[in-house]
Image: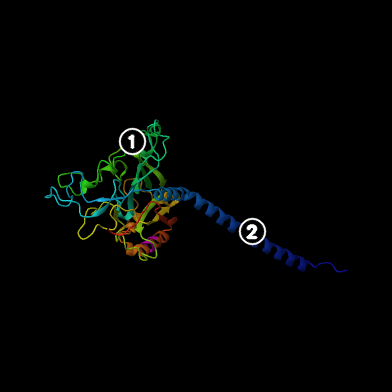
């Protein structure tokens, strides 16, 4: 019986060491990948949760649209101020509620801000808080801001350190403060009225005068852009330009134009809304932080002139991704099409 030679033993040990090295390298690689993925999931957990909140809220948005004659409560045509006894000549879609998508008022590059009514049953009044179906005015938008005014009162003070971040903000106007009925459709057509018809959203608007802790709260940090794109179905509107060219949508715009026809968007919810949310990681946000009211130039420059024309959506998104990748900024994009359940879409009368 022959024993192993020293050379054979050395070769066997070398092969074993090589195999162990390969196994350890693979294990380390898998461990790093798992840790990185877990870290990424944790970093974007708030953005993912807030994205779900937006989707759920939008599915319950309502306008309660109805058909009525084209006359005001005095019996005169809203479009003919000289008429005193002119009878109505047509039907119009009408609504006492309002659905609005407009460019972000702090920075158009941050996408759009949205305002609507939804039965969220939110109230600060304990006597009615348990009532189901209470109507609230809601909003969502991105804002670059300090968190000083966003903290609980007990945590504010001279020694608190400001934290400047891009933040996804949610507005929620309590039922008892709902003011959309105060500013009706007449404000858009009556030259004697000074209102614009959008005063109802002041408490929940981007840069509104209401104390922020009352109606507007942050729901996620490091969301750099939020894009709302109202559309028809894919079959009816493959390029997404049928309802808007600049993402804007105003259910009251030209709602009483009857010559030639009332716009198809008047007092109607769009059938679908494509929602896109772009978030960066906290690690990237810390690296880019300016510790001031001046946003990171890399992000703001990358967003400049983006998401203002629906035709350029894919190109804008690709260009933004290229910049973020080039600067090694961790990011995640959430995108979905939401069916507006309360939309009763119809053609012009």
Q: How many marks?
A: 2
Image height check: is 238 above or below 174? below
Q: Position of residue 145 (x, y in %)?
A: 34, 45
The image quadrant of residue 176 is top left
Q: From the viewer's perspective, tell me whether residue 183 is left or right of residue 170.
A: left
Is 6 situated above or below 70?
Answer: below
**Distance from the alpha carbon under mark 2 to that under mark 1:** 64 Å
* Magenta range: 316-320
**Mark 2 vs mark 1: in front:** 1
Tell me if I can see residue 144 in this picture: yes
Q: Nearer the viewer, residue 166 or 66?
A: 66
User: Residue 306 location, x and y as percent?
Assistant: 32, 59
Looking at the rendered structure, the secondary structure element under dot 2 is: helix
Q: Is residue 103 visible?
A: no
Give the color scheme: rainbow, by chain, secondary structure or one colour. rainbow
Work out which residue is located at the far right of the displayed protein and give it.
Answer: 1
- Magenta span contains residue 50: no
User: Does the stretch in magenta take in 319?
Assistant: yes
Which corner quadrant of the image does residue 314 belong to? bottom left
Magenta-colored segment: predominant secondary structure: helix
Residue 306 relative to residue 26: left or right: left
**Residue 249: percent from the left, percent from the top?**
30, 55
The image's mark for residue 24 is 2
Q: Which mark is residue 12?
A: none
Q: Quadrant of the C terminus?
A: bottom left
Q: Label for residue 176?
A: 1
- Secondary structure found at label 1: helix
């Amino acid at each position: 019986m022959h024993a192993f030679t020293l050379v054979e033993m050395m070769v066997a040990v070398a092969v074993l060491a090589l195999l162990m090295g390969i196994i350890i390298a693979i294990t380390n690689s898998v461990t790093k990948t798992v840790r990185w993925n877990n870290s990424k999931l944790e970093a974007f957990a708030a953005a993912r949760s807030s994205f779900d909140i937006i989707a759920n809220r939008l599915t319950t948005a309502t306008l309660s649209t109805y058909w009525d004659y084209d006359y005001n409560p005095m019996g005169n045509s809203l479009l003919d101020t000289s008429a005193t006894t002119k009878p109505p000549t047509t039907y119009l879609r009408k609504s006492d509620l309002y659905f609005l998508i407009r460019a972000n008022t702090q920075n158009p590059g941050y996408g759009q801000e949205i305002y609507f009514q939804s039965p969220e049953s939110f109230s600060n009044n304990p006597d009615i808080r348990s009532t189901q179906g209470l109507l609230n005015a809601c909003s969502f938008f991105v804002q670059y801001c300090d968190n000083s005014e966003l903290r609980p009162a007990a945590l504010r003070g001279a020694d608190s350190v400001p934290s400047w971040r891009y933040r996804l903000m949610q507005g929620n106007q309590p039922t008892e403060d709902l003011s959309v009925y105060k500013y009706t459709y007449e404000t858009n057509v009556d030259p004697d009225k000074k209102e614009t018809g959008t005063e109802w959203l002041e408490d929940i608007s981007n840069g509104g005068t209401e104390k922020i802790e009352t109606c507007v709260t942050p729901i996620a940090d490091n969301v750099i852009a939020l894009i709302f794109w109202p559309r028809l179905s894919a079959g009816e509107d493959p390029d997404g330009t049928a309802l808007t060219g600049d993402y804007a949508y105003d259910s009251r715009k030209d709602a009483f134009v009857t010559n030639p026809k009332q716009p198809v968007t008047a007092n109607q919810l769009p059938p679908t809304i494509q929602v896109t949310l772009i978030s960066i990681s906290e690690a990237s946000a810390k690296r880019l932080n300016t510790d001031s009211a001046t946003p990171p130039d890399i992000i703001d420059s990358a967003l400049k002139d983006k998401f203002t024309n629906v035709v350029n959506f894919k190109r804008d998104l690709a260009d933004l991704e290229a910049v973020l990748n080039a600067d090694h900024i961790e990011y995640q994009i959430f995108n979905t099409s939401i069916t507006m359940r309360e939309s009763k879409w119809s053609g012009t009368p």
